[in-house]
Image (cartoon, rainbow, N blue to C red):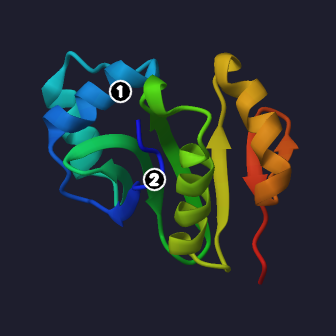
Amino acid sequence: MDFENIVYRRDESVGVDLVADLYRRSGIQRPFSDLNRIRKMTENSNLILGAWQGQALVGIARALTDFSYACYLCDLAVDKAYQGKGIGTELIRLTKKAAGEESMLLLLSSPDAATYYAHVAPQLGMSLKDNAWFIPRKK
């Protein structure tokens, strides 16, 4: 697989079928068989960043933010075949950039993902706050 041709873009209207299939391929615990629920999840999110290889959605960051004070990164999912290549790290970085310097980024980790976040947190300026990963506001 060619991991160097990944394109990142903002995708608020990404297809529900693509998102559900990516959730399934990533191993994230989401209701990927309930397309109506996935549709609600994506339609009501105001910041979605996709990682694409050609027409294939290989990663997603889905967030809720006011672009001024707070950003909650609800989902970070990368296709298992693409994990370990920095795609998740880049999606977090781009989410924080889109949310803005005034905004903090909050990510609640599942126990299965805690090792991953412990590894990438220092690169991104994240710190552990009880049960959450946190990027403080710059202003």
Q: Which mark is residue 63?
A: 2
Give the labeled residue for mark 1: 23
Give coordinates of residue 80: x percent, y percent.
Answer: 47, 24
The answer to whether 113 appears left or right of 45 in the picture is right
Quarter that holds the N terminus = top left
The answer to whether 51 appears left or right of 38 in the picture is right
Q: Residue at x 66, y 31 (%)?
A: 109
Give coordinates of residue 124: x percent, y percent.
Answer: 76, 58
Closer to the camera, 116 or 16? 116
Task: Check the image and report above or below for 133 versus 99.
Answer: above
Mark 1 and 2 residues: CB-CB less than 8 Å, in contact?
no
Q: Which residue type does callout 1 highlight? A: Tyr
Give coordinates of residue 4: x percent, y percent.
Answer: 47, 53
Q: Please identify the quarter of the rendering in which residue 35 is found.
A: top left
Classify mark 2: helix, strand or loop: strand
Q: Residue at x 46, y 35 (%)?
A: 77
Q: Please identify the quarter of the rendering in which residue 111 is found.
A: top right
Give coordinates of residue 28: x percent, y percent.
Answer: 46, 22
Classify mark 1: helix, strand or loop: helix
Quarter that holds the C terminus = bottom right
Of tags 1 and 2, the one toward the viewer is 1
Task: Check the image and report above or below for 100 versus 36.
Answer: below
Task: Choose the circle earlier in sequence order: 1 or 2.
Answer: 1
